[in-house]
Amino acid sequence: MAYDVQNFQQEVIQKSFEKPVLVDFWAEWCGPCKILGPVLEKLAEKHNDKWVLAKVNTEVHQELAMQYGIRGIPNVKLFIDGQVTDEFTGAMPEAAIEQWLQKAIPSKFAQHVAQAADLLQRGDIQKSQEILESVLAAEPGNLAAKAMLARSLAFSNPQKAVELAQDLEGTEHYDLSEALSEIAYLYDRAENPDKLPEAPVKSQYLQAIADLKHLEFEKALKTFIEIIIEDRYYDDDGARKACIAIFKYLGDSSELTRDYRTRLSRAMY
């Protein structure tokens, strides 16, 4: 839903207590405004259950432009509960705006995703997955839920995890997407060992993948690094790529990531 603002107090401020209001400050003479406007209107129609789009012509409403400190247009401000909570200036691609909206507008399922994260951390994977699948059934574009579900499936159903992760490319979850693709590759190697070149490290490589399947991350990392020292480019630099995938899966805050990233650097150089 999009509309030209006539009464800012009623149509933006008061309305934002019911639903987030995205305000597009624009002008007829502004070239980038003509590029951004249709993109915002398309997104407003797509997400009409989550937010509304209000358009403010700065030539007509100069006092509003001054009040909200508009120094360049197009300027887009998000109003929630009567306050500006986020904004951006200039034309952006549709995908970038979608990503910005995901961060800027809280999902009504945020608590469900938080509950699923807690369950996942405590090892109740099945219940966590059930919650995440219900969230995605109601809100298919929820990237946080999609990323968490993909993460939970990484070692039980890597192909499904990769399918879910395809939508994460170009988002803040991109590292996870890359990690899941590499994990799926390793699983394929384990299921089809004939694809691997014959070499003294082959059995070690398969054992490291087996350890990874059982979530024995440290054992897997230790073996992969031993392979790098012995046969650096085995399986097209597979051991190094496996280490990077594990680091991305665990995240930068993981003690294992910090420790074994240093060990990997030493092994390579």
Image (cartoon, rainbow, N blue to C red):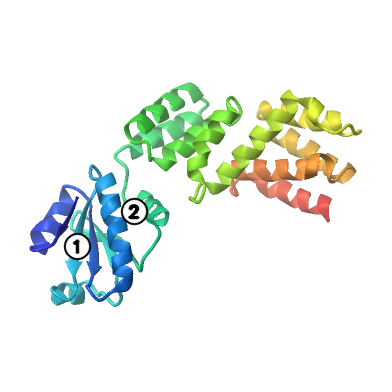
- Quarter the C terminus occupies: bottom right
Amino acid tagged 1? Lys
Residue depicted at 50% across the width and 51% down the height: 170
Residue 250 in view here: no
Q: Is residue 187 above or below residue 252?
A: above
Residue depicted at 39% across the width and 62% down the height: 92
Disc 2: which residue: 104
In the image, 112: left or right of 53?
A: right
Residue 28 rendering spot, x and y as whole percentages: 22, 73
Residue 203 rendering spot, x and y as whole percentages: 85, 28
Residue positioned most to the right: 200
Label 2 element class: helix
Q: Nearer the viewer, residue 22 or 94?
A: 94
Label 1 element class: strand
Residue positioned most to the top: 126
Q: Label 2: few (<14), some or many (≥20) within 10 Å?
A: some
Q: Label 1: few (<14), some or many (≥20) within 10 Å?
A: many
Residue 2 disc label: none
Residue 94 in view here: yes
Residue 231 rendering spot, x and y as whole percentages: 88, 42
Residue 55 disc label: 1
Q: Is residue 218 above or below residue 134?
A: below
Residue 248 rendering spot, x and y as whole percentages: 61, 45
Q: Nearer the viewer, residue 242 or 60?
A: 60
- How many numbered callouts? 2
Amino acid tagged 2? Ala
Label located before the other in sequence (1 or 2): 1
Residue depicted at 24% across the width and 49% down the height: 51
Q: Quadrant of residue 130?
A: top left
Q: Quadrant of residue 146?
A: top left
Q: Is residue 193 above or below residue 222?
A: above
